[in-house]
Amino acid sequence: MSKPKVLIARGIFPETISRLEEHFEVESNQADALWSKAELIARLQGKVGMFSSGTERIDAEVLDACPDLKIVSNMSVGYNNLDVDAMTARGVLGTNAPDVLTETTADFGFALLMATARRVSESEHFLRAGKWTKWAYDMFSGADIHGSTLGIIGMGRIGQGIARRGAHGFGMKVIYHNRSRLDASLEAECKASYASKEELLKTADHVVLVVPYSPASHHTIGAAELALMKPTATLINIARGGIVDDAALAVALREKRIAAAGLDVFEGEPKVHPDLLTVPNVVLTPHIASATVPTRRAMADLATANLIGFLTQGKAVSPLNPAALAGRT
């Protein structure tokens, strides 16, 4: 009996391919080519499952052209590459990889906050350029982290991890804004208090964004929101590109309306708004918040488990749209 066919859309650990090959006929992309939509559709013909890095857009056009597809398994926690409504309507399951990257991403969010507040990237460029010739009392003076006010927009698992690091590790006052308020026990664990978005932006010394992307969260931070922030404040985005209006942020940074920003995600990435590349007071990293070997392996393992579990037993570990199964025969 022939095995079901699955597609791995990007380069991945060889062990992941081997594990999937125990159950499926696998077409992999170890060359890590970036396929066009037409190429992706062609590769998906006859495939019942897809292992996605989270960058491959699965929309109604792709789904209609690939009628055999039953599951798309993201190895990322974010899933804005998936049109979940279109998938549900066509009986295609989507899965993601929550939990396994929470602490690593929170670590990086805090690292980016510290690098931004203390002007690490800016001062390193200065040193490498051979400009450091003497000590000065105000040379690259940044902002304190300990004892300052940390504002978190998006208080899910990762937001809570950042809150705990700030409150328990650095004695920060933590305020947060979320679609729904946390229960009292979680607030106490994070030493965090709820605030309106406007109050948070006006009050926080450091603002960290950890909200999932959706049309509703597009440009959560734009020119109007940046105008509310302190001129000494920093802004950190480890959420998704599109949460921040990058063009407006570049203007605010250039005009010193806020002190600095740290960005791991960008609108239209891997392209970066050219104005962000010309302002010195921003730390830029290429979407690496979850990039440790143990965490990336755990993400790949969970995506693999979702594919195997669903296609062999009808049960996924972390389904996004279980309603998709209701109409499948």
Image (tube, rainbow, N blue to C red):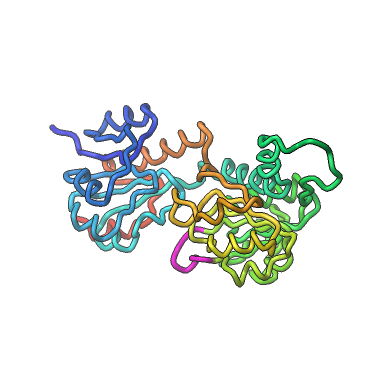
The location of residue 247, given as percent across then percent down, is: 53, 62
In front: 270, or 74? 270
Q: Which residues are magenta?
A: 212-219
The image shows residue 270 at horizontal and vertical percentages of: 44, 48
x%, y% of residue 22? 27, 28
From the viewer's perspective, is 89 left or right of 278?
A: left
Please tell me in which quadrant of the rendered image residue 299 appears: top left
Residue furthest to the left: 1
Q: Does the stretch in magenta take in 248?
A: no
Residue at 71% from the left image edge and 46% from the top image edge: 119
Q: Position of residue 65 (x, y in %)?
A: 18, 55
Q: Say left or right for 143 vs 323.
A: right
Q: Quadrant of residue 91?
A: bottom left
| 271 vs 126, nearest the viewer | 126
Q: Where on the picture, by quarter, is residue 206?
A: bottom right
Front residue (pair 198, 131): 131
The residue lying furthest to the right in this view is 137
Q: Is residue 15 left or right of residue 325?
A: right
Image quadrant occupied by the C terminus: bottom left
Residue 213 part of the magenta-drawn span: yes
| Residue 106 showing in the rendered view | yes
* Quarter placement of the N terminus: top left
Report the number of discs: 0
Residue sitting at x 72%, y 62%: 204
Majority SS type along the magenta span: loop
Q: Is residue 160 visible?
A: no
For the point 29% across and 58% down, which residue is it?
A: 59
